[in-house]
Image (spheres, helix red, strand yellow):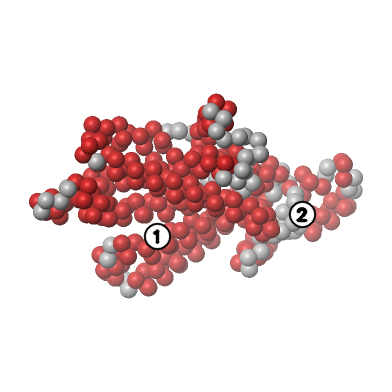
Amino acid sequence: MMQRSLLRRVGQSVLVLWAAFTLSFFLLQVLPGDAVLIKFQNPDLGLSPDQIAEMRLAYGADNPLWQQYVHTLLAMLRGDFGYSVQAGVPVSEQLVSNLPATLQLALLGFALATLIAFALAALSRLPRLRFLRSVLQSVPALFISLPTFWLGIALIQLFSFQLRWIPVINPSALQGLILPVITVAIPISAPLAQILLRSIDQVFTQPFVAVARAKGASESHVLWHHVMRNALLPVLNVAGLLLGELIAGALITETVFGLSGIGQLTQQAVNNQDVAVLQAVVMISALAFVLINLLVDALMPLFDPRLQSIAGGHR
């Protein structure tokens, strides 16, 4: 039963990837400008019109659109993302050199965001901090309203220029990650905390919580042993979506802090109209999003066995 449900989800994921490829391919084709001309019409290169035409032929820029679509699709199915016109190297080499930094930033930011969300949720339910509950529950709304670029600049201003705790020039590997990770984590922690708080409030109204209290369990014991485990399911589902978006949306943070990652690579590709690089970034982002959500779908029945019977009922 679960295998059929998972296979159905895999099939849907393949359709999502194909749709992402098709939509991005045709949208990129209508962008103004031409990457080949942008590079090779530079007067400093001194190329003749015939030589430029040969370069366009080598890159397949003059082929009919449907041929370019089929060629690009078949190549990507083989793991070939083509060549970067501006860099003159395979796009896969650029991805290999830039993707680890983005993954590191995204995973560390997500881990910190999860800690912040759980800390806010737990502190807001502690009896000793009941007088601060309304304040703590309003913090996620504040976090989600902070623009990422403004938050990054504000952190640099505070910790680098005012307090001088983190150097701007030549920081160590650890120092160079602290502020970007915080910048990524704070906005992501907001929806996680909001959903976790709402889920905790709903679980606290369930009869088994009243039974646990009647048996003499403390509020802390009820929270961590009865409520929290049942409140995690909605958070797990949304966490998969947020992590996928986080990996795909590192452009602003990497730009603010000058980090070499997929975000910087995307910005350079947009400036140079490097379609092959942009297409590869879209597909890598879509693949990350799909794989993360497939993993979440596979893990959720482990947290709630009732989902196994639900999946079996929709065979």
Q: Residue 272, position in %: x, y?
A: 71, 44
- In the current view of this chain or complex, which residue is farthest to the left? 214
Nearer to us of marks 1 and 2 is 1
In space, the residues marked 1 and 2 are separated at their CA atoms by: 38 Å
Q: Amino acid at mark 2?
A: Gly
Q: Residue at x 44, y 49 (%)?
A: 111
Q: Considering only vertical position in the picture, is 158 above or below 5?
A: above
Amino acid on which disc 1 is placed: Val
Residue at image point 27% right, 39% down: 124
CB within 8 Å, label 1 to label 2? no
In the picture, measured across the screen, residue 226 lies left or right of residue 155, that is left
Where does the image place residue 59, in percent across and percent down from the top left?
76, 57
Check disc 2 and report the residue beneath it.
88
Q: Nearer the viewer, residue 20 or 287?
A: 287
Which element carries disc 2, helix, strand or loop?
loop
* Residue pointed to by mark 1: 296
Q: Nearer the viewer, residue 161 or 231?
A: 161
**277 left or right, relative to 48:** left
Question: Between 96 and 266, which is closer to the camera in this rendering?
Answer: 96
Query: Residue reaching furthest top?
Result: 162
The part of the image, by quadrant, that contains residue 240 is bottom left
Horizontally, residue 271 falls left or right of residue 165, namely right
In which quadrant of the rendered view does residue 84 lie? Answer: bottom right
Categorize mark 2 by other alpha carbons within 10 Å: few (<14), some (14-19), many (20+): few
